[in-house]
Image (tube, rainbow, N blue to C red):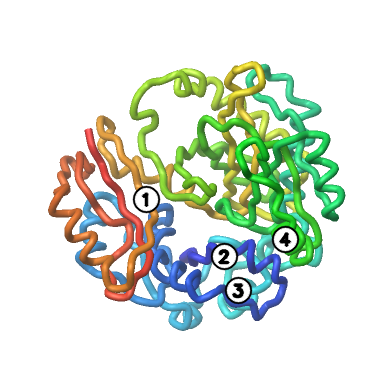
Amino acid sequence: MSDIYYFNPTGEMAIANGFASYMPPKALRQFECDLALMPSYFAQEGDVVLVQDKPNESFLNIWQNIGLPICNYITLKEAEQQKNINFIRPWSWSPACHHQLKNLKANSSSHFKSSPNYSWQEDDKMFFSRASCNKVQTYLQHNCKHSEVRIQKAAINVYSIDKVEQWIERNGKAVIKMPWSSSGRGVHTVDTENNRPLNKEWLRGAINAQSFVTVEPLLQKAKDFSYQLKLDRNGEIIFLGISHFTNDNKGHFTGGIIHWPHQTNAISEFFNEDLIQSSAQLLIEAIKSLQPHLKYEGYLGVDGIVYVDELGQLKIHPCLDINWRYNMGNVNIQLPRFIHSNSKGVWKVVSVKKGLWNDFTEAESKKKPLIISGSKIISGFIPLTPPSSHAQFGAYIEVFQ
């Protein structure tokens, strides 16, 4: 029996909307189409990946020769004819996703039908909001005794502009977030010292759209990362590893770092394996306090940062956001298996003008030819998404020694 993967990274928007009929904006539908193969990098041999367009065979051959599982790339309509479905694994669950995949659910295994993921309950919307992250932060603030893991003030839910202004007046710099948003979107930073005042129009729109916002202190960030975890239906949580990634100046995810650190520095010496493991276990304990297995099972990514505190000391904030879904960190922690252990790399998600993706990848491949030895990439450029004459988004890796 095969698992079925579906790349639908607009889950938070669909949850906020709440309707089974929700459809993402045109640009995001194009993003979903262009990056539909991304689940291939963590799928298993024989699994199904839903696509609109069948991927280029030569592209697949290159990747499969260095260890990419051989998956079955079919459309949703074709998948609905299958009877041997094990688990259905969209990037994220929402009422719209449940409706879209209803025919697959009908043909799924009894194991999947007994999963909390099988149906959408009325209170799921709040669980999948940032309110759950706020509870984990509060737990850590009160229970974490680790000297290098510190949450100064947990995020809170705020339901009016006046209350947000009062919080800023008492606490100063702030990060205001819409409860259903991701990848740095739906986030407003207030830092009057650096000419970033409160935008009341944005705040009013956010509260009108989603009923409340969350507010927390703005920290002096030194590094982004995420804990990659797996939650089973019995409540156990496994730490899979750290995803090291990059964001743009608005906090939007732009890509990942392979075999971090590329150079040893004060941050890499601070954020060492002992601290990674100990902070991950503290985080797992805090997440378990929510009993999340009653609402969800599967993969999740928890965004954290290394930051500089008011005394100039490096600290970890381990839980800025919880993504109760697949995320680019799942891709990031799998990519090293294709890369030689002595090499390093970066991978990026980019937007391009329609019709230029193929030109871009061909030009970069010539400038940085791919070198493979022992089924591992030593150096060079390789796209993560296939050739397409109509793509407006793509992903690629650059590997170097």
The answer to whether residue 63 is left or right of residue 280 is: left
Label pair 4/3, CB-CB below 8 angstroms: no
Query: Secondary structure under badge 3?
Result: helix
Q: Residue at label 1?
A: 348
Q: Residue at x 69, y 51 (%)?
A: 177
Q: Residue at label 4?
A: 201
Quick one: 2 or 17, which is closer to the camera?
17
Q: Quadrant of the C terminus?
A: top left
Lower sequence index among marks 4 and 1: 4
Real-space Cα separation, disc 4 to disc 1, in angstroms: 33 Å
Query: Secondary structure under badge 2?
Result: loop
The answer to whether residue 287 is left or right of residue 123 is: left
Real-space Cα separation, disc 4 to disc 3, in angstroms: 42 Å
Lower sequence index among marks 4 and 2: 2
Mark 3: give few (<14), some (14-19) or many (20+) Cα within 10 Å: many
The answer to whether residue 219 is left or right of residue 66 is: right
Query: Secondary structure under badge 1?
Result: strand
Q: Of the numbered discs in the image, which one, if any, rests on residue 105?
A: 3
